[in-house]
Image: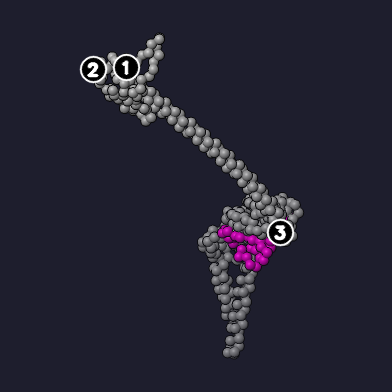
């Protein structure tokens, strides 16, 4: 309605301006003032301006990624989707909402942020009393079908961000982080807290007609005193771990040396057993070889003796006796008589001696076997 009054005031102003110009021209020409002409000109200018303005105000273009909610005398009468639309001039009002993603972000210096809506970081404390500052990002969009309700209950886009996104996110982040100890948040393990905050905001946004597309805790800042304390604690923990590792290494080296010593003792034991078994086997084989050699030698000696025994006769024995005589006659004492040695050889000498054929000796099959050669008469 205020826009209609503005356009009407502008049309009247132009009509008055044209009327004053016409009156000035008539006075300069010293002609009588034509009231009908002046009124016609005034009305014509006013109607022309109002007509052009009404036509221009009746056409509305809704851009892609936006939606328009039509208000008439304070009441919502429709929704315009992207495209060209016509409305009642000077009466209908179109409130534009973006349906694309809108970014709300908190940081230490909001002027350096490229978000659509920027704010300062949130101050809070952990469950163990450590002061922290949270920096986060919220991405959301307005549901086109809920745009009339949003306009009716919340207002424009800026009012939606201020009343829902900013208020809800800062309260939820502050209260949720208070449930977590500083150690969990300092170590970077913030996924659980981030998911809890996102779930709460998603429900809150859904009730307001918004859709939460992303929530992220970009960083959590701690005080310098806490950082120094954590650093000292980490150094102590690392020293403990180092000492523990050294102890484990020493234990491992000890076990390794014990295993190596046991393995060496076992190797020496097996080596001694192997040597003893080898020597025993060698002695056994040598004893078997010696026994076999003795057996073969005995068999050869027995065969030789047998052949010698078969080749001996009384004549051969007598002949060998003669061959072994040294020419001296031994004195043989009998029963009161002296026996001359010549009487011993009388039978041998008086008969023809026919030597027996010499046996052919059998060669010894093994080393160490001695063959006895028979004496040839």
**Image disc number at residue 227:** 3
Q: Callout 1: 10 Å neighbours few (<14), some, many (20+)?
A: few
Front-most of 338 and 187? 338
Magenta range is 96-125
Determine the residue positioned at 64% across, 56% down.
217
Determine the residue positioned at 59% across, 80% down.
18
Instruction: Tell me the CA gap for discs 1 and 2.
Output: 17 Å
Determine the residue positioned at 66% across, 52% down.
242
Q: Is residue 61 visible?
A: yes
First along the sequence among labels 2 and 3? 3
Q: Which part of the image, by quadrant, shows the C terminus?
A: top left
SS at mark 1 in the image:
helix
Front-most of 273 and 235? 273
Q: Callout 2: 10 Å neighbours few (<14), some, many (20+)?
A: few
SS at mark 3 in the image:
helix
**Image disc number at residue 323:** none
First along the sequence among labels 1 and 2? 1
Query: In the rendered image of this protein, does residue 371 appear above or below residue 243?
Result: above
User: Residue under circle 2?
Assistant: 352
User: Residue under circle 1?
Assistant: 342
SS at mark 2 in the image:
loop
Tell me, yes or no, whether the highlighted magenta stretch contains residue 121.
yes
Tell me, yes or no, whether the highlighted magenta stretch contains residue 115.
yes
Query: In the rendered image of this protein, does residue 179 appear above or below residue 88?
Result: above
Query: In the rendered image of this protein, does residue 276 appear above or below residue 180?
Result: above
Residue farthest to the right?
129
Q: Given contact means CB atoms under 8 Å apart, are the residues at marks 3 and 1 in contact? A: no
First along the sequence among labels 3 and 1? 3
Q: Is residue 308 visible?
A: no
Q: Position of residue 116 (x, y in %)?
A: 61, 63
């Amino acid at each position: 309605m205020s826009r209609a009054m503005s356009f009407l005031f502008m049309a009247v102003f132009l009509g008055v301006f044209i009327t004053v110009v016409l009156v000035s021209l008539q006075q300069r020409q010293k002609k009588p003032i034509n009231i009908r002409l002046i009124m016609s000109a005034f009305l014509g200018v006013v109607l022309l301006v109002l007509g052009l303005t009404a036509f221009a105000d009746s056409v509305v273009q809704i851009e892609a990624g936006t939606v328009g909610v039509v208000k008439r005398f304070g009441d919502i009468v429709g929704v315009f989707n992207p495209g060209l639309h016509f409305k009642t001039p000077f009466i209908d009002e179109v409130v534009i909402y973006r349906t694309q993603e809108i970014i709300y972000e908190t940081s230490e210096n909001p002027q350096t942020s490229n978000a659509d809506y920027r704010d300062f970081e949130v101050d809070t404390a952990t469950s163990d009393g450590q002061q922290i500052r949270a920096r986060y990002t919220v991405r959301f969009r307005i549901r086109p079908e809920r745009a009339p309700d949003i306009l009716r209950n919340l207002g424009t886009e800026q009012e939606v961000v201020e009343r829902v996104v900013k208020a809800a996110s800062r309260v939820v982040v502050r209260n949720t982080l208070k449930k977590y100890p500083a150690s969990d948040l300092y170590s970077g393990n913030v996924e659980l807290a981030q998911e809890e905050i996102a779930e709460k905001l998603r429900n809150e946004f859904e009730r307001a007609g918004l859709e939460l597309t992303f929530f992220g805790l970009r960083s959590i800042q701690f005080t310098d005193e806490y950082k120094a304390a954590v650093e000292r604690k980490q150094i102590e923990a690392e020293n403990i771990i180092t000492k523990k590792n050294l102890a484990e290494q020493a234990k491992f080296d000890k076990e390794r040396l014990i295993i190596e010593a046991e393995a060496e003792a076992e190797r020496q034991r097996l080596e001694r057993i192997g040597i003893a078994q080898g020597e025993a086997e060698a002695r056994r084989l040598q004893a078997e070889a010696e026994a076999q050699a003795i057996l073969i030698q005995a068999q050869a000696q027995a065969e030789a003796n047998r052949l010698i025994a078969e080749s001996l006769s009384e004549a051969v024995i007598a002949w060998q006796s003669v061959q072994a005589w040294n020419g001296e006659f031994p004195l043989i004492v009998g029963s009161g008589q002296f026996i001359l040695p010549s009487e011993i050889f009388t039978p041998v000498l008086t008969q023809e001696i026919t030597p027996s054929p010499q046996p052919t000796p059998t060669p010894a099959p093994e080393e160490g076997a001695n063959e006895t050669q028979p004496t040839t008469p």
